[in-house]
Every structure is written in structure tokens, then in C-alpha cells.
Amino acid sequence: MHLTDIHCHLLPGVDDGPDTIKGAGRLLDLMKEEGVERIIVTPHFHPEIFETSMERIQRFHGGLREMARRRRIRLYLGCEFYRCPEMIHLLAEGGRPSMAESSYVLVEFAPDDVYQTVRNYIYELRSQGWKPIIAHVERYECCHRDSRRVRELAELGASIQVNASAVLGKRGVRTKSFCKNLIEADLVSFIASDAHDERGRRPNLGKCARYVAKKYGQDYARKIFEENPEKILRDRRRK
């Protein structure tokens, strides 16, 4: 299986990922050990918390891309947008990147956001021609309370992403059960590592892919970890 990680924080010194280029290199080594061949790095954009300049992000992305190339990993640039009123404008003006220059946008919500807030942002992104990916949906209490809401968001045009650690049970039994129900309802489009560091939030995509393949079959695992990410990389936003 050709694994692609679509959500992780490997760029040094731009958010809460690694502090140094050496730390980023060690994360790349762990990614390689996990069998990851392609990565979309997704530094946070969160007003007043993570607003690193695009010049700095692009500079570190260029350096890390060369390090990844030496490990035979292809690296692409994306962004994890925290939902905010500026999001649509930043995307339209190129102030922050979409996922690998595609129409796909990774968007994060607050754990206690009400469902209508989530729904409104998804609707607005879709109305502007973007393809939203809801980051780690297992964190949002409004969806936990009623999983039918996840189906409604998917029917609105959102792709659903869950974290590998949640699928593997590292975030508790309740969260693992929630992810299991979404997978069995065929509502999950992407599983990603959301890796940040070498300890508590380390790369784990290979382990999760093996678990998913064993539990749900090779064809399903290939769809989640290979075919669906390929759709992002083949997509191109019309300028």
C-alpha cells in the first residue's frame, strides 16, 4: 500500500509541531519507518494563536521538501484552518494554501462548537467551490451527541477525516467506538496521523493502516490511505 498522510505538523518553528529542523528530520524518519510515501504538511492557521507568515512557512517547506526527497518521500503544502471569518478571503486571495494547490481545504472547529456553526462553514466553503475536509471529526461534541449529523455534513459535500490515534483507541473507548461506527457507515474519507512530535503525537499511519486492513479488508484500507488522498493530489483549483 502507498500511504499518504494528509494531515500532520512537521514544519519546524511554525506552529506546535517540532521546534527545530533536526526534530522535523526525525519525524520524517519515523514517517518513513511507517511506510508513508507522500505527505501533505498542514501547519495551523488560527487567528491570534498561529499566524506564521507565509514567507516563513514556504521557506521551511522548501527545506523540508528536500530532506523528504532524500528519504524518497514526496512533500506537499497545505494548511489546517481553524474556522474563522477570514478563511474564505484568505483562500480566495492565496493568503493561505489549500491542500496541495487543490480545491480541498482542511478545516478545524472548536470542540464545543454548536452543530449549526459547523454546518454553516461547510455550506459557505461549498458555495464558493471549495471541497472541505473536516479535521478530526471525533473531537466535536456536537457530532458525538448525534452521529447522524456527520452523515448530513457528508451529504453537504464535506469529506470526513479522523485521526489514526482515535481509530487505534489511544483517545479512549468512547472515541474509538465513534470512529468505528463512522467507518462501518462508510462516512470516513481520510485517516491521518495529525503527528506533531516524537512522543505523545508521533507518526502512526502505518500501524493504523495495518489495523484497518485487518479489520475492514485490504480494499477498504487502500481506498482510505491511497485512493482518496490521490484525489486531492490530482485535483487542481481553477484560478
Image (cartoon, grey):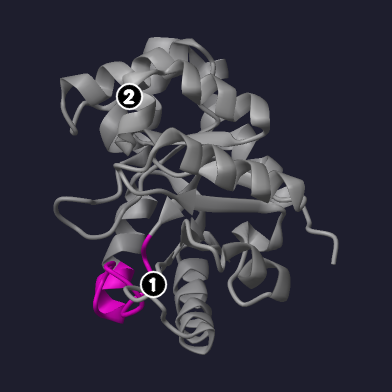
Q: Which stretch is magenta?
A: 9-25
Q: Residue at x 85, y 60 (%)?
A: 238
Label for residue 141?
none
Q: Is residue 54 above or below residue 37?
A: below
- Measured Cα–Cα span from mark 1 to mark 2: 31 Å
Residue matched to label 1: 11
Residue 10 located within the stretch drawn in magenta: yes
- Between circles 1 and 2, the one closer to the viewer is 2
* Neighbour tally class for label 2: few under 14, some 14-19, many 20 plus, Cα within 10 Å: some
Q: Which kind of residue does numbered mark 2 sit on?
A: His
State left or right for residue 73 relative to residue 44: right
Residue 141 occupies quadrant: top left
Q: Which of 16 and 82 is in front in this view?
A: 82
Residue drawn 54% across the image and 63% down it: 85
Horizontally, residue 110 falls left or right of residue 200, namely: right
Q: Does the magenta stretch include residue 16?
A: yes
**Horizontal side, residue 117 vs residue 230: left or right:** left
Question: Main SS type for the magenta part?
Answer: loop
On the image, the x and y values in percent for residue 51 come to 41, 78
Quadrant in the picture for the C terminus: bottom right
Q: Which residue carries the number 2 mark?
A: 144
Compared to residue 217, the image places residue 65 above or below, namely below
